[in-house]
Image: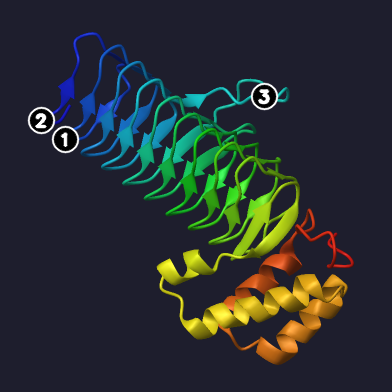
Amino acid sequence: MSTNIYIHPTAIIGKEVELEAEVRIGPYTIIEGPVTIGRGTVIGPHCHILGPCVIGRNNLIGSNVVIGGKPQDHKYRGERTSVEIGDDNVIRENVTIHRGTAQRGVTRVGHRNFLMVGCHVAHDCQVGNDCTLANNALLAGHCILEDQAYLSGNSAVHQYCRVGRLSLISGCSAVSKDVPPFIIQQGHNQVRGINAIGMRRAGFTAEQIDAIRWLYHVMYLQKLSVPTALARIEAELGHVDVVQEFVRFVRSSKRGICGTRAGLADAA
């Protein structure tokens, strides 16, 4: 093992574990199997990390976190699956991140994400970069969370759903359809506007935000079918990059997209 590593005397570290420099491991933590932990990562007390698992550099992992546990999937038969976590993540107390299901299946968490207390990232999920999952947010199996998405407290996302870039899921919401980028979702599969504040904070121009605001009006408030709305959006603002991103997302959706009670004639 490298230098400048601190392992509390009560921690149990398996023979296959590889620790880079300046890793710190708290009391009663168990790390077993083929696990690699990057430089500067700090792991709190009472954690359990099971390989195959790769954790990058400068992550902060709070107490009672479980990473690499068996997937909660009846189909799982002990296949060799894994978890990959990037750099500079904050993973707070009682978070669970399960490994993939099918042979060589991987659950991935990217860089600079903030997973608050009690979050669950299920098997085969793909979490991008700079995402926030507030307390007790839940991702079911095979979900895709694109960069800078925000899940508020006690929200839940159904398996195989996609949550688009810079979208915001409101507290206590239930999502069983795809949420397009830049959209605020609230309640059960209902949209409530655009994430203008998040877009401004991310450095979007006023023109880009105005384009998404106009797009939202056409897509959700004019009671057009999805194909008709997309055709109009592309005809008028198809040259705008964020509009192109939104249109690509909707066209590639396999579960249908969240809609409104009064609008979006065919959300499926």
Q: Nearer the viewer, residue 97 or 136?
A: 136
Identify which amino acid the numbered label 3 is placed on: Tyr
Q: Nearer the viewer, residue 19 or 185?
A: 185
| First-in-chain label (2 vs 3) | 2
Colour approach in the figure: rainbow
Identify which amino acid the numbered label 2 is placed on: Thr
Please say if 213 is above or below 185.
below
Task: Give the residue drawn at x 55%, y 45%.
Answer: 152
Dividing the image into 4 quarters, which one contains the C terminus?
Answer: bottom right
Task: Give the residue drawn at x 72%, y 22%.
Answer: 74
Report x, y in % for residue 239: 61, 89
Tell me the CA gap for discs 2 and 3: 38 Å
* Residue extending furthest toward the left: 4
Q: In the drawing, what numbered circle is on residue 76?
A: 3
Which residue is tagged 2?
3
Report x, y in % for residue 249: 67, 66
